[in-house]
């Protein structure tokens, strides 16, 4: 069985149930179908960056982690979803390992930005003196993610360590 929209299945940070219709065709061309429910349990360790503000999150070496930040590609803001009222998200990640860890930018827009569109909108910069990469959303908002120990404004280039969902 092939699932055409795997994005919904892989984007779940907690186990989630999905209703699918499965259709089978035998050697003579007869078909039948049935509705099934599949529970998808995500593989990996998910860290909600939107739950933190003005803090440093420590990645664990040897553990594949996905660091999730909610943002809106229409207005360019990222936010701390647990704050009341919502406020900008400013967080640093120490120990992030490209190829092991992943940045996931969860776009609130109805049509998520493509990776190329995403890279064109926030300000990406490196600070050689601090050995950091900074992903700054709208400057007036102040939202930012800083990768400590990494200097890479392409976020992995041909082998990206980020995704936009």
Image (cartoon, grey):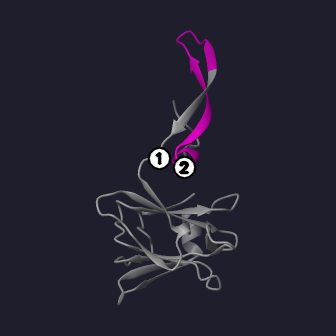
- SS for callout 2: loop
Q: Is residue 13 magenta?
A: yes
**Residue 99: image location, x then y, percent:** 35, 61
Q: Residue at x 34, y 66 (%)?
A: 97
Q: Which residue is mark 1?
A: 42
Residue at 29%, 63% in the rendered image: 61
Secondary structure found at label 1:
loop
Query: Measured along the vertical axis of the image, is residue 149 above or below residue 117?
Result: below
Residue 32 drawn above or below residue 56: above
Q: Is residue 43 left or right of residue 54?
A: left
Question: In which quarter of the view is residue 109 placed?
Answer: bottom right
Coordinates of residue 114 in the picture (x, y in percent): 58, 62
For the record, the magenta segment spans: 8-33
Find disc 2 in the rendering and name its residue: 12
Examine the rendered structure and indicate whether residue 20 appears above or below residue 122. Answer: above
Figure quadrant of the C terminus: bottom right
Residue at far front of view: 84
Tag 2–tag 1 contact (CB < 8 Å): yes
Q: Disc 2 or 1, which lies upstream in sequence?
A: 2
Label 2 to label 1, Cα distance in Å? 6 Å
């Amino acid at each position: 069985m092939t699932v055409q929209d795997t994005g919904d299945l892989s984007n779940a940070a907690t186990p989630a149930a999905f209703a699918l219709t499965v259709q089978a065709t035998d050697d003579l061309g007869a078909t039948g179908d049935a509705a099934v429910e599949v529970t998808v349990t995500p593989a990996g360790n998910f860290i909600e960056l939107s739950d933190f503000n003005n803090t440093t999150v420590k990645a664990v070496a040897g553990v594949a982690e996905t660091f999730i930040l909610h943002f809106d590609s229409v207005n360019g803001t990222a936010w701390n979803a647990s704050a009341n009222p919502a406020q900008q998200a400013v967080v640093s990640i120490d120990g992030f390992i490209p190829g092991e860890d992943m940045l996931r930018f969860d776009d609130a827009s109805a049509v998520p930005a493509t990776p190329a569109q995403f890279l064109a909108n926030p300000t990406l910069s490196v600070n050689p003196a601090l050995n950091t990469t900074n992903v700054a959303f709208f400057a007036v908002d102040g939202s930012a993610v800083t990768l400590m120990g990494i200097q890479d404004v392409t976020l992995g280039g041909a082998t990206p360590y980020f995704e936009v969902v």
